[in-house]
Image: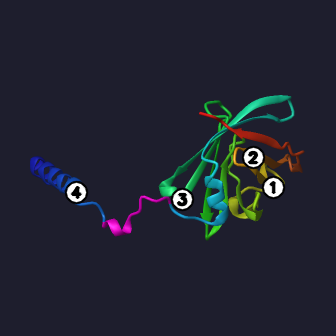
């Protein structure tokens, strides 16, 4: 009996692996098109370097951006390869830029587009993400300024122990490969 079941499973797997792919008219090799702000964020793909001061003097920092999930998600990695590595995922939610930040604090604040113009994108805290701002330290807002094609400035608003911490704008340059 086990032999028959194994043969049937093997036959099904063989048929599935040789069957034509889904109708090519429903698939696209082009990345998914998003909101204007999400499309602007896609211009960040690559590695960016800078120096930041998180209250203990300047330190080197780099950000890596890559496009995932058929072009529908932009991943940002910060402090890659360290115990403080953080990941932020940018995506469109109902046609509006949103993000989820997986923080070294062990939480995941969410933000939604607050405002944008030709040179900047501002995201602000999404109260539905499950964080109580009065009790939990977290990243609360983010502004990204596109200074030029190879320079950006980021500024994060953090809430620490229920109080707004001073912002530390950081300028990043696109790494030359």
Closer to us: 93 or 126? 93
* Residue tagged 2: 152
Is 128 rendered above or below residue 144? below
Give neighbour class at mark 2: few <14, some 14-19, many 20+ (Cα, 10 Å): many
Observer-side mark, 2 or 3, equals 2
Q: Which residue is mark 1?
A: 133
Q: Position of residue 99 (x, y in %)?
A: 66, 56
- Give the labeled residue for mark 3: 72
- Mark 3 or mark 1: which comes first in sequence? 3
Q: Is residue 26 magenta?
A: yes
Q: Which secondary structure dominates the residues rendered in magenta? A: loop
Q: Quadrant of residue 128?
A: bottom right
Badge 4 crowding class, 10 Å Cα cut-off, few under 14, some 14 to 19, many 20 or more, is few
Q: Which residue is mark 4?
A: 16
Instruction: Quote the CA–CA distance across marks 2 and 1.
Output: 28 Å
Nearest to N terminus: mark 2 or mark 1: 1
**Disc 4 vs disc 3: which is toward the camera?**
3
Q: At x 62% / y 70%, what residue is drawn? A: 95
Point out the tag, 4 or 1, that comes first from the N-terminus.
4
């Amino acid at each position: 009996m086990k032999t028959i079941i194994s043969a049937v499973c093997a036959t099904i797997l063989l048929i599935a692996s040789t069957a034509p792919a889904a109708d090519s008219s429903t698939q696209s090799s082009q990345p998914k098109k998003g909101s204007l702000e999400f499309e602007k964020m896609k211009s960040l793909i690559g590695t960016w370097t800078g120096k930041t001061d998180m209250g203990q003097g300047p330190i080197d920092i780099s950000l890596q951006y890559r496009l995932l999930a058929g072009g529908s998600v932009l991943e940002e990695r910060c402090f890659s390869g360290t115990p403080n590595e953080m990941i932020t995922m940018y995506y469109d939610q109902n046609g509006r830029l949103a993000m989820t930040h997986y923080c070294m604090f062990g939480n995941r604040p969410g933000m939604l587009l607050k405002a944008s113009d030709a040179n900047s994108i501002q995201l602000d805290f999404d109260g539905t993400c499950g964080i109580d701002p009065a009790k939990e330290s977290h990243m609360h807002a983010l502004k990204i300024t596109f200074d030029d094609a190879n320079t950006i400035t980021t500024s994060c608003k953090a809430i620490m122990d229920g109080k707004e911490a001073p912002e530390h704008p950081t300028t990043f340059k696109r790494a030359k490969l």
